[in-house]
Image (cartoon, coloured by chain):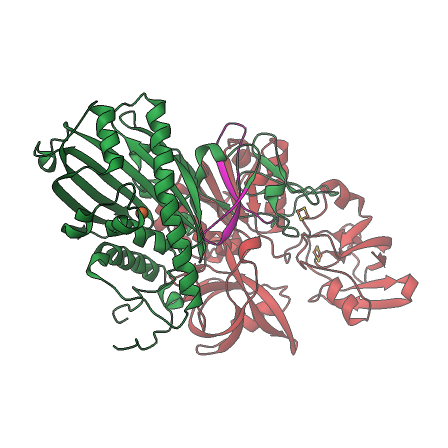
Chain colours: A red, B green
């Protein structure tokens, strides 16, 4: 948001580490110049991936009132782009470079009703909101969905804290979340805040539209790193420039194009603004659209893609992985 | 931390976790109004059903002022530059030339509430914006009181206005022709406080009624002659609202013991909203509890106070200019500043609670002669 989106880098020290679920580690950092972290904020952290400096965003799960201790929780993904490996490798006392809290996902105080929806590790972005709503005595429901209890961070604490306002859905127990019935029961004055895997968020977005609810009341945070398919290596070509390069699993197409000397335009690098749009000339494979810039119609047409987050994958039907998928594009 | 030493700062910061008047209720309309409160430029308007809205006056896209745009539909405002629309919560509702809405596109929307004929805005932590904390100004909208007021744009730090109102000794000098009289500075006063309020009470017994009060007495008691008991009870409520209970009654009729029936009573309602560190919006009204249906008296009183406050305004402007022109000189205090000093201390404590006191402390040069 316009008022507090400027980035201030600082140093911080890791002061506490604890595993809070399978593959999820809580990392508490004491920043050098603390400022209060409102719910919905995240910090960017300088990480080293394959020997190179990079930046990853992590939601602030908890913070004390003056922001002297920031708790993050990092999921070590099997298909990690490398940031989570770095974060899981930190020891107590380690120094990191991080930003002051950045706000892209503010909670609005004063709505008539709220749904807080968390899928898996997405709980990190919304847990603080639920806590504020509880403290304010707001009318809210906290819906938390995951694959199995062992994989759901902070589950027991949250059940204690939110009592009968929390609703837990566990795939492994045969109680998955039914999105249409969740969204179908909401009134126009309900605001829904969510963070989770793209399938969940997309299902909610569709249901939201189907039920004719106001789009501005659907709030979500996307760091653009979750897709419909696991990332694969693929080839990108720009015929006009005679350029061809391979996009590795753990890099974005935008990064690969930059490394290859193309000069793509970009801004947000998380699939929101549409500035990194490329035109698709030829394609052997499918596009895994991970942006929120295109409408469903535009994504299905696949004439364009946001190269900062979206990828090319082998069509599920062919199943053959012998040849890498290939895309030819023109930069816009 | 040690005892704060910033109480006599020439420029006092303003707490953010507080309700400030953004405007008179009638100033907020379907046509957006640009006004800066507490260093935050705001676009102020009303929705179709009359709810007040305060958005940051800078579009998410390229920061064009939304106040130059127009309101649309039920509760929307459109940026005048490239046409992004926002609802009253500050959420983007449409973007030019694309089929979707960027989920990050919001402008801050600040809590704002209509009460006592004013629209009150909260610019601090929204989680703490409890309307129960709006300062008491109930005389503004009570059927037992009548009156009206105006806004002064005062080119000085808001605290200078509070200082002015907390010590009415200045009346003898600044307002010699209307309400000033010698007994003011000669009479004793009593200061009490708790953690949100400060009260300064002053009674003057068996005195000549000054011209302003003689006229008011004659409005209620036609042909009144004689001496009066006069009171001034200043009620401050943090951070910047001051109501002054003022009046006179026929001398010796027991006003000080609670029987004001033989007198006239007014409330000077003042609430100050910092604009910048060196300017403020000063909203005032004069309310009375007699001759309630006389619009003539309402207008006369408003015009009369307008004249009196014009004298304060000139003094405050000159004082701020002298402060700015003499950066190496400090404030000293008199005994008459007790009320104002308590106000300053309560404000310091609010700033301290917000973690903002240190940042506002000026370096403390050694005082000349101290
Ligand atoms: S850079 Fe913004 S969508 Fe890709
Ligand atoms: S500056 Fe507001 S739409 Fe561009
Ligand atoms: Fe005055």
Of helix, strand and loop, which mostly describes the magenta segment?
strand
- Residue A18 position in % (x across, y down): 42, 68
Pick the quarter of the image with the C terminus of chain B: bottom left
Residue B43 magenta-highlighted:
yes
Image quadrant where residue B76 sits: top right
Magenta stretch holds residue A106 = no
The reply to whether residue B120 is visible in this rendering is no
Asked whether residue A28 is in view, the answer is: yes
User: Which of B162/A211 is in front?
Assistant: B162
For the image, the number of numbered tags is: 0
In this picture, which residue range is highlighted in magenta? B34-58
A212 over A124 or under it: above or below? above
> What residue appears at the point 50 percent right and 54 percent down from the top-left corner?
A40
The x, y position of residue B321, in whole percent, is 43, 60
Of residue A194 and residue B178, the one placed in the foreground of this image is B178
- Image quarter for residue B87? top right
As drawn, the residue found furthest toward the top would be B293
Q: Look at the picture and state if B177 lies above or below A322.
A: above
x%, y% of residue A189?
A: 50, 33
Q: Quadrant of ligand 1?
A: bottom right
Q: Residue at x 34, y 74 (%)?
A: B364
Q: Is residue B4 left or right of residue A122?
A: left
Q: Is residue B322 left or right of residue B107?
A: left
The N terminus of chain B sits in image quarter: bottom left
Q: Find residue B136 and report its horizontal and vertical position in percent.
A: 29, 39
User: In this rendering, is residue A277 above or below B291?
Assistant: below
Q: Nearer the viewer, residue A226 or B180?
A: B180
């Amino acid at each position: 948001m316009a008022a507090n989106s400027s980035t201030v880098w600082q140093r911080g020290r890791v002061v506490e580490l604890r595993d809070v679920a399978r593959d999820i580690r809580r990392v508490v950092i004491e920043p050098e110049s603390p400022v209060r972290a409102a719910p919905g904020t995240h910090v960017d952290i300088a990480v080293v991936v394959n020997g190179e400096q990079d930046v990853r965003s992590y939601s602030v799960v908890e913070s004390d009132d003056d922001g002297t201790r920031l708790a993050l929780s990092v999921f070590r993904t099997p298909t990690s782009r490398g940031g989570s490996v770095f974060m899981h490798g930190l020891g107590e006392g380690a120094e990191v470079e991080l930003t002051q809290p950045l706000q892209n996902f503010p909670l609005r105080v004063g709505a008539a009703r709220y749904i807080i929806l968390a899928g898996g590790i997405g709980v990190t972005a919304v847990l603080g909101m639920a806590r504020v709503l509880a403290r304010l005595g707001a009318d809210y429901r906290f819906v938390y969905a995951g694959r199995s209890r062992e994989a759901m961070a902070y589950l027991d604490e949250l059940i204690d804290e939110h009592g009968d306002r929390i609703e837990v859905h566990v795939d492994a127990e045969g109680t998955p979340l039914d999105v249409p019935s969740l969204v179908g029961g909401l009134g126009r004055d309900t605001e829904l805040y969510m963070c989770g895997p793209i399938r969940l968020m997309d299902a909610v977005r569709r249901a939201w539209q189907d039920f004719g609810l106001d789009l501005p009341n659907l709030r979500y945070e996307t760091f653009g790193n979750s897709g419909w398919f696991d990332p694969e290596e693929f080839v990108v070509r720009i015929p006009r420039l005679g350029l061809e390069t391979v996009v590795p699993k753990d890099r974005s197409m935008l990064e690969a194009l930059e490394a290859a000397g193309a000069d793509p335009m970009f801004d947000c690098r998380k699939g929101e603004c549409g500035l990194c749009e490329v035109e698709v000339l030829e394609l052997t494979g499918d596009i895994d659209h991970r942006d929120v810039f295109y409408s469903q119609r535009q994504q299905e047409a696949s004439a364009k893609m946001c190269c900062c987050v979206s990828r090319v994958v082998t069509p599920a039907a062919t199943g053959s992985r012998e040849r890498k998928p290939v895309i030819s594009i023109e930069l816009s | 931390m040690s005892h704060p030493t910033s109480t006599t700062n020439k420029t006092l910061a303003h707490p953010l976790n507080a309700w400030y008047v953004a405007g008179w209720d009638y100033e907020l309309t379907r046509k957006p109004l640009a006004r800066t409160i507490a260093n935050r430029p705001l676009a102020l308007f009303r929705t179709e059903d009359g709810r007040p809205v305060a958005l940051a006056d800078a579009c998410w896209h390229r920061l064009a002022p939304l106040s130059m745009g127009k309101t649309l539909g039920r509760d929307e405002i459109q940026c005048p530059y490239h046409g992004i629309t926002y609802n009253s919560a500050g959420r983007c509702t449409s973007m030019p030339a694309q089929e979707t809405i960027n989920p990050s596109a919001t402008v801050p929307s600040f809590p704002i509430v209509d009460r006592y004929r004013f629209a009150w805005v909260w610019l601090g932590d929204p989680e703490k914006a409890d309307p129960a904390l709006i300062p008491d100004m109930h005389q503004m909208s009570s059927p037992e009181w009548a009156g009206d007021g105006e806004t002064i744009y005062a080119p000085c730090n808001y605290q200078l206005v509070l200082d002015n109102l907390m010590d009415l000794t200045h009346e003898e000098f600044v307002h010699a022709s209307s309400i000033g009289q010698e007994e003011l500075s000669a009479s004793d006063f009593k200061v009490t406080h708790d953690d949100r309020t400060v009260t300064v009470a002053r009674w003057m017994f068996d005195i000549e009624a000054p011209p302003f009060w003689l006229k008011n007495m004659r409005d209620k008691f036609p042909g009144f002659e004689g001496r009066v008991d006069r009171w001034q009870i200043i009620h401050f409520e943090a951070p910047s609202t001051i109501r002054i209970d003022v009046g006179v009654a026929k001398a010796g009729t027991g006003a000080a013991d609670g029987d004001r029936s033989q007198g006239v009573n007014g409330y000077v309602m003042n609430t100050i909203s910092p604009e910048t560190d060196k300017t403020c919006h000063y909203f005032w009204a004069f309310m009375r509890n007699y001759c309630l249906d006389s619009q003539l008296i309402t207008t006369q009183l408003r015009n009369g106070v307008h004249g009196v406050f014009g004298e304060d305004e000139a003094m405050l402007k000159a004082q701020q200019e002298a402060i700015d022109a003499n950066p190496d000189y400090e404030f000293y205090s008199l005994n008459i500043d007790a009320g104002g000093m308590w106000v300053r201390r309560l404000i310091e404590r609010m700033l301290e609670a917000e973690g903002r006191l240190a940042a506002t402390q000026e370096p403390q040069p050694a005082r000349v002669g101290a």
